[in-house]
Image (cartoon, coloured by chain):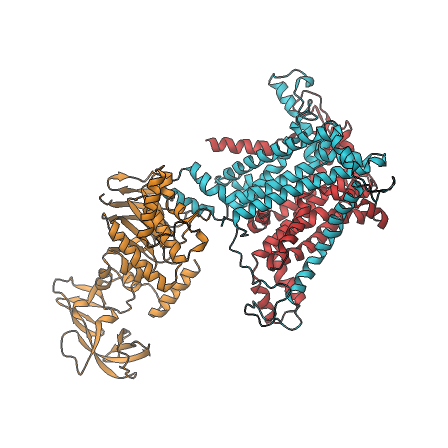
Chain colours: A cyan, B red, C orange
Amino acid sequence: MSFRSSSVAEPAPYGAGSAPGSAIQRSARLPGEWPDGLKVFALLSPALFLIVILFLGGFAFGFLQSLGLLSLVGDGSLSFSAYGRMFEDPAVRASLPLTLRISIISTVLSAILAVASALLIRSTKRGQKFLVTIFQLNIPIPHIVGAIAMMLLLQQSGYFSRIAFALGLVSSPAEFIPLVADEFGVGIIAHYMWKEVPFIGVVVLAALQSGVKDYEEVARSLGASSWNRFRFIILPFIAPSVSSTSIIAFAFTFGSYEIPFLLGRPFPAALPVVAVQSYRDSDLLSRPEAMATSVAITIFISILVYLYMRIADRYTGGVR
Amino acid sequence: MRAAIGRGVLVVGLLIPLVPLALWSITRTWQYPALLPQEFGMRGFQELGRPGSDLLQGLTTSSIIAVIVTFAAAAVGLSAGRALGLHSFRSKRLVQFLMLAPVIVPAFAVTMGIQVLFIRVGLADTLWGVALVHMIPTVPYVTLVMGSVFANYDIAYEEQARVLGASSLSIFWRVTLPAVFPGLAVASLFAFVISWSEYILTLLVGGGAVKTMPLLLFAYIGGNDSTRAAALGIIFIIPPLLLLALTSRYLTGSKKAISGLGQL
Amino acid sequence: MSATAVSLSNLTKFYGNHHPAVNSLSMRIEPGELVSLLGESGCGKTTTLRMIAGLVRPNSGAILFDDIDVTDMSTEKRPVGMVFQKSLLFPHMSIAENVGFGLRMQKAPQKEIDEKVERMLGLVQLEGYGSRRVGQLSGGQEQRVSLARALIVEPDVLLLDEPLSALDANLRVQMRDLIRSIQQQIGVTTVFVTHDQAEAVEVSDRIALICDGKIEQYAAPEDFYTAPDSVRVAKFFGTSNLLEGNAQGGTFTCEFGSFPISSGHASGEGILVIRQEEISIVDGQPRDPGDVSVVVEKIQYLGTKTRIWVKPGNGSGSASVQLDASPSFRPLAGETTTLRFNPRRIHILPAEVRSEEPEFSEESENFVSTVKEKSR
């Protein structure tokens, strides 16, 4: 059992075929009340309908198109050649290391900084509200605006460059190291971190403020130093929050189109950029390859999340 | 002492990108390497006053879509969250995974797939089509948050109301809704911001005919007009920030809602 | 290893600008003693305990363990062990890992940790539970593990903050005995916070009754019954027989009559305190000093006893006395009978300014304090 909220009182399992008069009955059925199975179905159906049609359907159609079927041109016969072409495509081959690098670095660094920030905020007595406010401020700022802000900050004629000039470190815009549209993807990583640290941080902060303090007091009475308290008490407590939001962040950064397009180079470009460019290519014959790329992205992320959920379940013994 | 420095770094780090953004939006002339604009001006914001301008059109379209999406996603997510949080049933884990998938999987991938369908059905290039496709990334977030809210919800309140003779509608309106409101507010905030900021989905399905603010912004980023882009950016931030201000007490007060995100 | 004495010297703690939670509190706990801090919620007992632990810093005053001033020492460095109301066992660790945590923090070798953990689990009667997980234990078992975890580091002072309040009544009694016997076995100086007077009486060497951040009385348990220091103490321990009157020579005169008291007692106004257990019914007319004639005012049959309220024999006056009699004795209201106040148990308090408190019966006192506890 981990620190996940296992204090949830789950009603007795009903299932679709709950026998009347069964021993565990939480509340007697009132006249006119629907059976539980029907209730659940009714509640879930709008969401399920949307997900199945739009999401699964979209994926299915995309998959079929990647196989050459359902296309608007071409002979419409089944073929895996789009995948072959995708693996050979230099744009894709260059894109993979870049995309992985960006996602991994930004997510890992964001998680570390988010935890540090949350701990810092928690320990702040005066001005805590101010810190929390600006922390939360970044969350609703749309990525596109963040990208504009980052460009104005990081480009060679940007604000950091001007500060460097004032400090005598550079004497012209060209001397300032390129941070946007650069090979490594620094600007992209900086942007993602700027957005992900508050996102992960807010969730971690909420977790930190829900009862860890009592356990910390016990640990203190047993002689645990702050580092030990962090290692043995706090970290396990916030691990679910951190890993959960980090996976969401990783998946987002891996699959995001806008930011790498705006802050990165045309080549090598991030995988989603490659996919969308292919898709919007006027040459409709490249459509299947575009679909193949996005199917590949989807499958990769899905496997990742599935693995994560399996590991998380095993760690918590399935208790949620 | 170290903590104070840390806090300073945190504040600076969070706020500094907004500094050039704000400054550029009120710039008339700002040459390198000045740290402050040489001349200030409101050119960037003047567009707001011009009726029929791209800006006003973009704001209107974005607002309409975001509002539709927020309410629809809230309704759908509220009921799905209730099912997941309050009930146990077979294949619950599968449903959870399904609900979660759109949070994780990039929406553009599936949108590329259904575009064909949208064209067939006539939803392509329409506002409703865009609103519909915005549901893909928003409904799962709302469901996730509401699922957590309902997991901590005590159904005894509803049973009590029913015993006192309230109708189902009355129970929903007077008991359920007020009780889950904080979480719902947070979830709706997410839905709004996601729809408000959405670019690629709008582009793919709207085909450029549905002109939302992100599309407008994108166009200006490419150009050389930093003032215009920055001003547009500032205008674009305002509605989400306003909503954040309105719901901020729920954001920190409702730990359960937030921790819903930590319960993957 | 000899036990540690604990001295608190003028401890004061303010929260905000209100009156202090702990108000210049001083006390000395002898080595190896188990002292209870007893009082209602909000009286400052928990704050005092947390100051001894180092979790709360006093605004002024000092805390000494033997001769060492620990007031500025952080909790991590203070040689204390704590058990809280919630067991707070670390959920992600096994029972053995929980118990051994303190030793691990001291960087003790694993073999030593394992041995001591086994021994500790045996001490709290949970042999073999080491490999279990936290979710598999009952409330009482968790508290025992919590105790083992605190004791394994051989603290100089053991601090218990209402450790039994979350357990149900039967379990509470068992656990109480276990804690007391372990404490005496090990001989560790212990401070025990509770709001339950019966618990404090059963378990403690001495009790400090705390009200409004100050010590009202600090004495052995029986003194609270035989010689309460004030009306407040008397009432807390369930006496409502408080008779105003006058002490002169060797007699105390009040509305009920005259009672013999020790001749050395100061003259003047005072309050006679007599517990209901120390009043008995005698046949016939008053004979010995301490016998009075009374008129029955009200009775209440309680199954195991009859509770009787009486007024002075001449029928006048506002004073009232309550006693418990055998359940077979069921007098009628208005009947005259004779009571004997046990002369050895008559206790005189100096006169006090009495606040306008309504007369609660014992049950409603308990009810009120139970409600207060539950809404804390």
Quick check: C78 above or below C307? above
Is residue B100 something that shows in the picture? yes
Q: Which residue is drawn at the image coordinates 29% and 48% (left, top)?
A: C25
Classify residue C374 as left or right of residue A195.
left
Q: How many marks?
A: 0
Quick check: B192 above or below C286? above
Nearer to us in this view, B237 or C213: B237
Q: Position of residue C360 (x, y in %)?
A: 35, 69
Classify residue B61 as left or right of residue C363.
right
Q: Position of residue C128 (x, y in %)?
A: 37, 52
Q: Position of residue B201 (x, y in %)?
A: 76, 42
Q: Which residue is drawn at the image coordinates 35% and 65% (left, top)?
A: C357
Q: Position of residue A162 (x, y in %)?
A: 65, 21
Classify residue C125 as left or right of residue C261.
right
Quick check: C302 above or below A26? below
Residue A112, by quadrant, is top right
Nearer to us in this view, A12 or B77: A12
Q: Which residue is drawn at the image coordinates 68% and 61% (left, top)?
A: A41
Nearer to us in this view, A155 or C248: A155
Is residue C74 something that shows in the picture? no
